Image (spheres, rainbow, N blue to C red):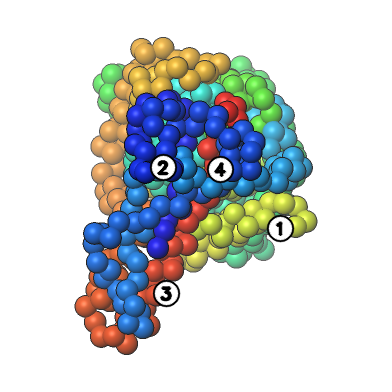
Amino acid sequence: MSGEYGLVSDEPRQGLYSRAGGGGGGESRPLMSGQPAPGGGPVTFTQIEHVPVQIPINTQPSLIHVNGEAVDAPRFEFPGWVPPADLKFETLEPVDRETLYHPSRGCLNEVYSTAICANDLTSSVFYVVGVTASMSGQLSPVCLIIVGLVLYLFKSVYGEAGTAIPLNGGVYNLLLNTTTKSLASVAACLTLLSYIATAVVSATECVQYASNLMPFIDVYWGTIFLLFLFCILNILGITESAIVAVGIFVVHIVSMVFLVLVALVYGLQNPEIMENNLREPLKYDWPLSLVFGFCVAMLGVTGFETSANYIEEQKKGVYPRTLFNTWLVIFIMNPVLSIACMGVLDLNTIEAHHRDVLAKVAYDAGGKHFGLWISADAALVLAGAVLTAFVGVNGLVRRLALDRMLPQILLAENRIRRTNHLIPIVFFVFCSLLFMLMGGNVRQLASVYTLSFLCVMALFAVGTIVLKYKRGSIRRSIKATWPTCFAALAAVTVALIGNMFLAPSKLIYFFIWFLLGTLAFLLVFERVRLLRWFLYFVSQGSSATQDRFGGVTQLAMDKMRAQKVAFFAKNDNL
């Protein structure tokens, strides 16, 4: 029995091997010092195929016997260093460059990339303005400005992480390259929970807005149909999804500009409303009002991390501009809309209508038809948030599958569009089943959405700090200063603790979903170890049980471990 292992070294190993008799030597010479291959040519990386290694006789005995013969168990163990004479060489066929090209890589320009990410960000304005005002009163614009400043810090944090390691996966990819795979899998679980909650909650809210405009729409089946619609759109490709996202984003921004203008005119005509709001007493002392308002206002920046999950699809240099554009939109729009609301409605009315405060402002300031317009815009931009979730989860799951954290079958591509169609299909099925199991009541997922997003932001700050410390030599076009990283981490930690304090009863839902997701990742991550345990228990059974399950399980372990690995080198001279 022999194992096959590749061996690459870029440092000379003097005297590493001793000559045994007259052959196979290489003593006092580098491991690969340019000696000719058996075919006569110079040794290059592309010629190395495998290294046959004789496994020592004194290895541990096999646990399984099939048909009376021992099944080799230690084939996964490292066999030790191998002398160069045992290397086998074979000239490989050149790779066709066209097979390496994927139509989705580097296809998104600045407008497309910004629209995909901004739809999720700007959709939160429909509830964050009212929720912030109910906690901090007339200080709500100040809270939203503080959130904008914190997001400016995270713009640098996300920018350094993305330009240093420009691969899909977001915080998972960052922690994978700076910490351990286990911690990275926890971050991936949190990100997936955030996307699942985003898709289900946004789809439900979208259909509810639409049903208010058109009562014949059924919220239950309408939500499932909306998820299915964006599943199909995602299968068609990210470019088609980006075109739809741009249309939604343009309509939303135009609607918000008109709303601000109408509210401004109404506020100038009725200045007493703003004056009364400014004299209204606060619920808490002003420091607590600022802190609590800031904590809930952080929900208005959910989705800012999405751009890092499809960074490979963006053209070169687009990612930093996407971060800046989305930050600028939020920094300007949220405080301005908060002021506009206080110029039209009193604080008690804002608190009573915190779920649809912008539609109420449009109805009071611009009339019934303008109110219907803003409601339609709310439904449209919430649909855009669903699209953002599909795009983000596609990039993340693809990265997880490439890293063997998820089944490889998810990487299957359809021949027509060359997209990973199974990823959006599985995501649609999971979200739909979750929505059905909850009976259409998605309030539990709202708390999961909140805490998952804040945890992802905190892990992004931690990952960037570790990246600066452990891998500071990696080139990156954006560098966040040490005070910026620690200030961003401190701010999001305050927001996380504050939201836990304000809604402690919702923690149980978050931990339930988080533990379920973590357990699923753990089962996939430790699947080989679990199969080894299964082999042990099978070995304690009868011969018939061993014959039936032993060989199949061993072959499954072989298939999981016998994966091809790409090694990147500066040149072909080893």
Kindly identify which residue carries mark 1: 414
Rendered image quadrant of residue 351: top left
Q: Which disc, if any, is residue 22? A: 2
The alpha-carbon separation of the residues under discs 1 and 2 comes to 56 Å
Q: Residues within 10 Å of mark 3 (few under 14, many from 20)?
A: few
Between tags 4 and 1, which lies in front?
A: 4
For label 4, the residue is: 48
Dot 3 falls on a residue whose secondary structure is: helix
Q: Quadrant of residue 333?
A: top right
Q: Amino acid at mark 1?
A: Asn
Which of 34 and 158 lies nearest the eye of the viewer? 34
Which amino acid type is shown beneath numbered disc 4? Ile
Tag in front: 3 or 4: 4
**Residue closest to the eye, 464 or 250:** 464
Q: CA distance from mark 4 to mark 1?
A: 33 Å
First reached walking from the N terminus: tag 4 or tag 2: 2
Residue 320 appears in the rendering:
yes
Residue 399 image position (x, y, % from top left): 53, 44
**Residue type, numbered disc 3:** Val
Q: Specify whether 4 is left or right of 368.
A: left
Cα–Cα span, label 4 and label 2? 24 Å
Tag 3–tag 1 contact (CB < 8 Å): no
Q: Give the SS element for disc 2.
A: loop
Which residue is identified by label 3?
552
Say if 255 sits above or below 52 in the image.
Answer: above
Q: Position of residue 153 (x, y in %)?
A: 45, 18
Q: Position of residue 305 (x, y in %)?
A: 50, 33
Is residue 218 placed above or below 131 in the rendered structure? below
Q: Amino acid at mark 2?
A: Gly
